[in-house]
Image: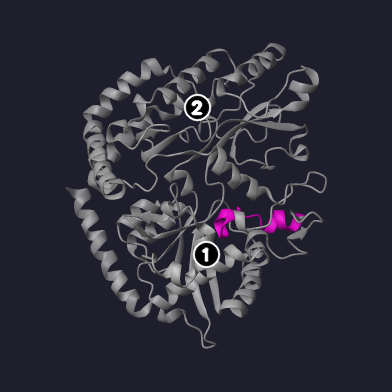
Amino acid sequence: MLRKFINIIVAVFFAISLSVFMLTGCEATRKNDDSIVLRWVTYQASDVPLDIKEVVEAANAVSKEKIGVTVKLEFQPSDKLNLMMASGEYYDMVFTSSWVNPFDKGATAGLYRDVTDLVKTETPALYDYVDPFWDAGTVNGRIYGIPLLKDMGAEEMFRINSDYFEGKKGMTIPERMNFEDIEPFLKAYKEDFPGRYPLDMTRGGVPGYMNSVERVVQTLVVLPFGEGHEASNVIPFYECDQLMDRFRLLHKWYKAGYIHPDAATIESTTSDKSIPVRFGVAWKGYQGFSNPENWGFNVKTSIYEGPFLSRSSEQGAMIGICAACDDEHTKACLKYLELLSTDKRFRDILAYGIEGKHFEYLENGTVLRTDTGLSRYNTALYQTGASAAASVESVSRTFLADPDQWKGVFEEYKTDGIYSAINGFAYDQARKEDIIAALNAIYSDYKTELITGTSDPDEVLPVMKKRMEEAGMKELVEDVRQQLEEWKKLNHE
C-alpha cells in the first residue's frame, strides 16, 4: 500500500510539474538572437569529459548556422536520471534505453512526447535514417523514442591471445565457434600454467549472457529466440534450457580451474594482461578488443552467438523528448537529431571532439583520437548521438578500421540477424511492480554465483524457483501472457 501511495504522489507531482513547464519551461530556452536552446541530458558512463564545454561550443556554432538550434549538454549518472524523471524536472531531450532510464517504463508512464506524425513531416531524413528500427521506440503503435543507430543486434565473442594459441600451440582460432568450443583452448592453457585461470571472469559474469533471449520483463521473464509470439512461449528465465545449460557449463569450467575461485567477488581484471581468453559484446569489425598496443600481444575475436535483434538490444541507446515540450521545441529536437544523423562532419564533433586537437582524419577516412582526445574528450559514441552516423575510429595508424564498417554490420543484420518474434511488444511493468521488485530481490541472492559458475545450478535453481513462485512468479508470467495476447490481437490479426 505504501509503495502504491508513493507512486500516486509522484504521478501527481509529475503532472503538476508538466503543467508548470508547459507554461514556463520552454519559453526560458529561447535566446534574444532567435536561436532555440535545448537542454539535452545524456547518460554519464564515467567521468564527465574535461573539454565538454569547448566541444559543445564548436558543435553549437555549426548547428546554429545550419538549423538555428543549439544545446546545453549535461552528463548525469543513472541515479540522477531516475530522480529527474520521477520528479518531473524539465528537459528537452534525454538519454533513455533498455538498460539506463528504461524507455518502456517512461513511455508507458507518459513521460515522452508522441512524435509519430512530426518525425515524418518535419524530419523525413531522420525518419528514413532510423527505419526500419522504429519499433524500438514505439508503444501501442505510437512513436515516443528516437533510436540511435549503433550495434542494434547483440553479438557475443571470445577475445583470444592468438600469439599463444596459434603461434605457440598451433591451434586455429575460427571466425565463429560455439560457446562450448572454447574448452580445448582453456584446457591447453591450464595444462601449461596450472596456477593460472585462463577464462576472464568477474562478478558481472559473462557479458551479454541474457542477449540470447528476449527479456520481456527485465531478466525475470523471457522468450527464447526461435519461439513464436504465442503467449505460452513466454517463460520464467529458470525454465529456459539454453540459459540453464550455460550456467551448468560455467560451473563445470569453474570446477576444472578455468575460472578464478574468487570470481564472484572480483570487480575488475583489466590490469591482468596475462588472461588469454576474455569475453566481448560488440559488432562485426569492431577493433577495440584487438589492439596489440594495449594488450602486448595479438588478439583475435571469435563470435559464438548472434547477432540477436530484440526490443531490448535495439533500445541500446535512444532519445526521448519531454512530454512537456511544445511543438516548436519538439521540432527543434527532431531537427537537431536529424542533423546529427545525416551530417557526418557535424556528428564527428560531438563524437570525437575538435579536429586537430582531439582527433584527426586518416587517409582512409577513419579517425584517430589524439592523446589529448583520449584524456580530455574520450566519450562513448552512443552518449552523443547515433554511433553509426559518425566516422569509424581506428585504434592506431597501423591498425586501420574499415571506414564502411557500419554498412557491413547492417547488411549482416539483414542476412544473418536472429530476430525476436515479439519486437514491438512492451509489457506494462506497473501492473505487477511489487512482484517484480520481490523477484529481483530473490534473484540478487543467487545471481552473482550463478553467472560466474561458482554455484551448481542444479542445487541452487530448485531453491530459487520455490522462493520465486511463492513471491508471485506464476502470477507475473500469466499477466505477461495476457497482455501479449492483447498485443497480438491488436497488431497481428
Q: Residue at x 22, y 33 (%)?
A: 472
- Name above or below for residue 392 compared with residue 173: below
Q: Which is nearer the eye, 264 or 335?
A: 335
- Farthest residue, direction front: 493
- The residue labelled by disc 2 is 264
The answer, for residue 163, to whether it is visible in the render is: yes
Q: Position of residue 95 (x, y in %)?
A: 47, 58
The answer, for residue 101, to whether it is visible in the render is: no
| Majority secondary structure in the magenta region | helix
Q: Position of residue 55 (x, y in %)?
A: 65, 67
- The magenta region covers 371-387
Q: Quick check: is 219 in the magenta stretch?
A: no
- Mark found first going from the N terminus, 2 or 1: 1
Measure how far apart labels 2 and 1 are at the Cα level: 44 Å
Mark 2 falls on what kind of element?
helix
Mark drawn on residue 136 = none
Q: Which is nearer the eye, 372 or 183?
A: 183
Binning the other alpha carbons within 10 Å of mark 1 as few (below 14), some (14 to 19) or many (20 upward) gives many
- Farthest residue, direction left: 1
- Name above or below for residue 469 compared with residue 340: above
Q: Position of residue 238 (x, y in %)?
A: 35, 26
Relative to 175, is 445 on the left or the right?
left
The image quarter containing residue 143 is bottom left
Q: How is the image coloured?
A: one colour
Look at the numbered discs 2 and 1 and tell me whether their residues touch, using CB distance below 8 Å: no
Q: Position of residue 468 (x, y in %)?
A: 27, 29
What amino acid is found at the position of numbered circle 2 in the picture? Ala
Q: Quick check: is 384 in the magenta stretch?
A: yes
Mark drawn on residue 126 = 1
